[in-house]
Amino acid sequence: MKKIAILGSTGSIGTQTLEIVRENKDIEVLGLAAGSNIRLLEEQIREFKPRLVAVWEEEKAKELRVLAADLDVEIVSGMEGLIRVSVLEETEILVTAIVGMIGIRPTIEAVKAGKDIALANKETLVTAGHIIMPLAKERHVSILPVDSEHSAIFQALRGNEKKALHKILLTASGGPFRGKKQEELLNIRVEDALKHPNWSMGQKITIDSSTMVNKGLEVMEARWLFDVEIDQIQVVIQPQSMIHSMVEYKDGAVMAQLGTPDMKLPIQYALYYPQRRYLKGDRLDFWSIGRLDFERPDMDTFYALLLAYEAGREGGTLPTVFNAANELAVKMFLNREIKYLEITEIIEDCMRAHKNIENPALEEILTVEAEVYERIESRR
Ligand code: NDP
Ligand code: MG
């Protein structure tokens, strides 16, 4: 039995991870963590029988203790609770499917405790990659990508010499507003931005995909996962989302991984790596696909991608500023407090105001996050 724990078990990636556990009978779930969805957590506890569950808010944890009173499970709360789930004694793999840079501390603690990480929570690597990657190396921990593009790159790198890698071709669907210009985006509503053409995901990443912030975060994520320079990563629009990403070698050979847009494939691959297992679902039918298209990203309209390249190139705390500004701006947009285009404007404003700190320690990252929030709050 493979033993895992999941941070963010009630979300899009978390529930799909549990579907894989349900299909394969050889994974045991020892720990779960979520924010506040205790109804779903209760169902998950009854079905998967974890021994430890963390709920962010203590009030909700209290309610869950009542709901699960007949079960043999310990329910904890807050950051301390999240960390306890992350370092559970017998866990081999921690699936980090929590959203946002709140995942930094639990991820670092899990790596320190020698857990392999199936990483969906990209915000953590973007802001603390310089801490997590060397630590993982030192502790002989594998960071297994769950993000579909990074899983594709990881797969395309297998069996080839890493030193022969020339560049990474990171594909993007272009999101729901591909082809539109700034003036057409002025009055975008929350409902419009939540309609992704190919993928069904959590709200934050769906908004991020529409602004191309998601691709920007993925560029920085790839930089850490595959130890390449930011400018070795080229974003290619592939509107059908069938090519999940590619790598180009020095001799010009390009390796790609293709598939239907289904996150269960990269999740399962991370859980069983290096094994491949059967996975239910649609297969690509090249006779009916007919064609695949490619485009250059429009970085004038979707200049968040340009800002991400700048943040990634500069490094230090600038990626934290990019990410934290986006996290709060997306929340405000979802609450209908700001307009769509303000998301990227806020990111740029915070980046321009920031004095970069090189090689920041964890505390400095968290301080910069708080400062960014203060700056945005003071604009209201
Ligand atoms: P969702 O919004 O669907 O789920 C987020 C999960 O995190 C929920 O379980 C939520 O709990 C939990 N959570 C939020 N805040 C806290 C907290 N303070 N403490 C504990 N748990 C918390 O997100 P996704 O599944 O879409 O995304 C998760 C991560 O994976 C993100 O980093 C995203 O970028 C990445 N990713 C997602 C993909 C996808 O297809 N969805 C694809 C590639 C990457 P609750 O439900 O109780 O609020
Ligand atoms: Mg992705």
Image: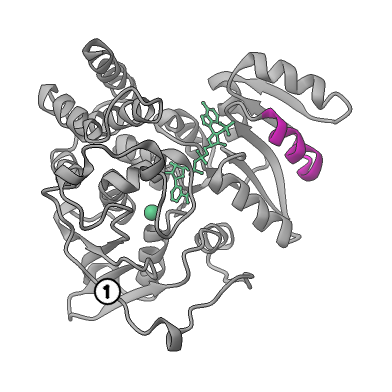
Type of amino acid under label 1: Asp
Query: Which corner quadrant of the image does residue 204 belong to?
Result: top left
Q: Which element carries disc 1, helix, strand or loop?
A: loop
Left or right side of 5 for 300: left
Q: What quarter of the picture does the C terminus occupy?
A: top left
Q: Main secondary structure of the magenta part?
A: helix
Residue 60 vs 110, above or below: the answer is above
Query: Where residue 227 sits: x, y (%)?
Result: 27, 54
Left or right side of 268 for 349: left
Residue at left offset 61%, top offset 23% = 81
Q: Which residue is mark 1?
A: 293
Residue 235 vs 65, above or below: the answer is below
Query: Where residue 39 sits: x, y (%)?
Result: 72, 31
Residue 274 vs 76, above or below: the answer is below
Residue at left offset 73%, top offset 40% = 44
The residue lying furthest to the right in this view is 70
Write the start and end of the magenta stretch as one range.
38-51
**Relative to the observer, which residue lies in front, 222 or 342?**
342
